[in-house]
Image (cartoon, rainbow, N blue to C red):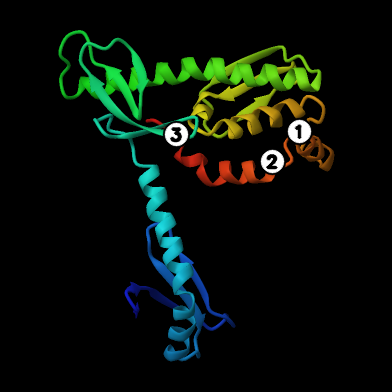
C-alpha cells in the first residue's frame, strides 16, 4: 500500500488500539493498525510520520553501506582517527603510508593474481593499523593512568568481537585495535572507561560519576560509539 512515494505493508490486528510504524532493516515499512480503523485514517497518520520514515530509511541505507565488506580496491575509503582516506595501491612503495588524503599501500614484489592481491592489501593494512593502535592506545593509557594514579599490569591489543575494551581482575587492560579507526576523543572514552573499572568493577552510579569527573561529555562520546561502532571495521 503506497504512502506518497514510500511503499508500506499494512498489518491489522484486533488487539491493537493504536497505529505502530516500523522501518525494518531490509527497508520495509510496516504499519500495524487496529482492525476497524479506516484506510483513510491510517494514511493520514502515516503521512504525518513521513519525515521520520525517510530519516530511518536513510539511516538503514547508510548503515548497509558502512557494513559492506571491503574489496581493497583503489578509491575505497578507510578511516583512521576519525579522518577518512582513500586507498591507493602504489607500485614500488614499501609498506603503508598516509599521503595527503590517501592511504597508500605498496604492492611490491611479484605480480599478484586478482584473487591474491586483495588478501595481500588487507594483510598489509591490518598490520599498519595494529602497529599504530599499539602506540596510540598505550600512550592514552599512560596519560590517563598518570592522571588517576593507577598502574595497569599490562596493556594488550586484541581482536575483540563484541567489546572495545576490558579490564581483568589482575589489572590487565585489553583493547580492540579497531578503536584507532575512531576519533581520538572516542579512544580516550574507552581508555578512561576501562581505567575506572580498576576502582569500580561495575557500572554503578559511582563508576559513572568517576568517568564523568574525567570526561564531562562522556555521554556524547558513548552515544557516538553506540551509533558508529558497527562501521569501524576494515574487513
Eyeballing the image, is 128 above or below 225? above
Q: Secondary structure at mark 3?
A: strand
Instruction: Check contact, mark 3 vs mark 1: CB within 8 A.
Output: no
Q: Secondary structure at mark 2?
A: helix
Which of these two is toward me, 157 or 75?
75
Indicate the position of residue 78 as horizontal and vertical percent values.
Answer: 38, 32
The CA distance from mark 2 to mark 3 is 21 Å
Could you tell me if the residues under marks 2 and 3 are in contact, i.e. CB atoms within 8 Å?
A: no
Q: Position of residue 54 (x, y in %)?
A: 42, 66
Q: From what the image shows, is residue 43 above or below residue 132? A: below
In this rendering, position of residue 99 left or right of residue 176 = left
The structure residue drawn at horizontal position 46% and vertical position 85%, both measured from the top left corner, is 44
Q: Secondary structure at mark 1?
A: helix
Camera sees residue 200: yes
Q: Which residue is under mark 3?
A: 83
Q: Residue at x 61, y 46 (%)?
A: 223
**Label pair 1/2, CB-CB below 8 angstroms:** yes
Instruction: Report x, y in % for residue 36.
Output: 50, 90
Question: Taking 165 as reference, is 139 above or below it?
Answer: above
Checking the image for residue 214, the label placed there is 1
Q: Quadrant of residue 190?
A: top right
Q: Could you tell me how far apart the alpha carbons at marks 1 and 2 are, in whole angstroms?
A: 9 Å
Left/right of residue 184 with respect to residue 83 in the rendered view:
right
Mark carried by residue 218: 2
Amino acid at each position: 500500500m503506497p504512502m506518497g512515494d514510500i511503499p508500506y505493508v499494512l498489518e491489522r490486528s484486533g488487539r491493537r488500539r493504536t497505529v505502530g510504524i516500523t522501518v525494518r532493516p531490509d527497508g520495509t515499512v510496516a504499519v500495524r493498525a487496529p482492525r476497524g480503523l479506516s484506510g483513510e485514517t491510517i494514511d493520514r497518520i502515516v503521512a504525518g510520520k513521513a519525515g521520520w520514515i525517510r530519516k530511518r530509511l536513510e539511516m538503514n541505507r547508510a548503515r548497509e553501506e558502512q557494513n559492506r565488506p571491503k574489496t581493497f580496491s583503489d578509491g575505497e575509503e578507510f578511516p583512521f582517527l576519525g579522518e577518512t582516506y582513500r586507498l591507493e595501491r602504489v607500485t614500488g612503495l614499501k609498506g603503508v603510508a598516509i599521503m595527503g588524503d590517501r592511504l597508500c599501500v605498496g604492492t611490491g614484489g611479484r605480480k599478484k593474481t586478482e584473487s591474491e592481491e586483495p588478501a595481500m592489501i588487507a594483510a598489509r593494512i591490518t598490520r599498519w593499523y595494529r602497529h599504530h593502535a599499539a602506540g596510540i592506545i598505550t600512550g592514552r593509557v599512560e596519560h590517563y593512568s598518570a592522571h588517576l594514579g593507577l598502574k595497569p599490569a599490562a596493556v594488550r591489543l586484541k581482536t575483540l568481537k563484541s567489546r572495545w575494551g576490558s579490564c581483568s581482575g589482575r589489572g590487565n587492560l585489553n583493547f580492540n585495535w579497531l578503536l584507532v579507526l575512531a576519533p581520538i576523543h572516542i579512544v580516550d572514552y574507552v581508555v578512561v572507561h576501562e581505567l575506572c573499572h580498576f576502582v569500580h568493577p561495575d557500572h554503578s552510579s559511582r563508576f559513572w560519576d568517576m568517568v564523568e569527573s574525567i570526561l564531562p561529555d562522556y555521554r556524547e562520546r558513548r552515544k557516538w560509539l553506540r551509533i558508529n561502532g558497527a562501521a569501524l571495521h576494515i574487513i
